[in-house]
Image (cartoon, rainbow, N blue to C red):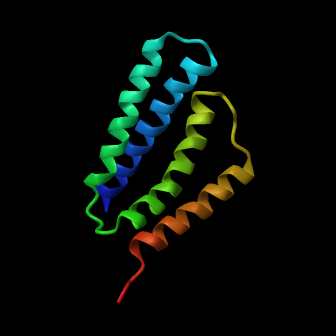
Amino acid sequence: MLKSIVIFILAGFAEIGGGYLVWLWLRESKPLWYGAVGGLILILYGVIPTLQNFPSFGRVYAAYGGVFIVLAIIWGWLVDKKTPDMYDWVGAAVCMVGVSIILWAPRG
C-alpha cells in the first residue's frame, strides 16, 4: 500500500509541476524552456502510473484523481499562496474516502 501511495504522489507532482511550468511559459511569458521542461515532465507523468500493481487502468486513474485533488490544493497553498478553506479540505477528504473505496474495497 505504501508503494501505491508513493507512486500516486510522484505522479501528482509530475502532473502538477509539469503543468505549472507550461502555465508559466504560456500565461506568464516565461522562457520557452519552461514549457519544454514542463512538457517532458508531463511525459514522465504519463509513465509513472504504469508502475502501479493494480490490474485495472480505469481504477488506477480514478483513484489517482482523488490524490491529484489533494495535491493540487496543497500546491496552490504552498506555491500560489492561496490558503485552502474548510470546503477545500472537506472536499479533499471526501475524495480520499472515494479513493480508499475504489482501491481497497473487497471485491468478489
Which residue is rendered at x = 40% and y = 35% of the image?
42
Q: Residue at x 68, y 58 (%)?
A: 90
Q: Is residue 19 above or below residue 45?
A: above
Residue at horizontal 31%, vertical 46%?
48
Pinpoint residue 33: horizontal percent, then vertical percent.
Answer: 42, 14
Question: Where residue 46 appears, x then y in whole percent?
Answer: 36, 44
Using the image, determine if residue 34 lies above or below residue 88.
above
The answer to whether 108 is drawn above or below residue 77 in the figure is: below
Extreme residue in the bottom direction: 108
Image quadrant where residue 23 sits: top right
Q: Examine the image and state in which quarter residue 97 appears.
A: bottom right
Apparent side of residue 82 relative to residue 59 in the rendered image (left or right): right
Residue depicted at x 39% and y 51%: 8
Which image quarter holds the C terminus?
A: bottom left
**Res 84 quadrant in image:** top right
Quadrant that contains the N terminus:
bottom left
Which sits in the foreground, 18 or 1?
18
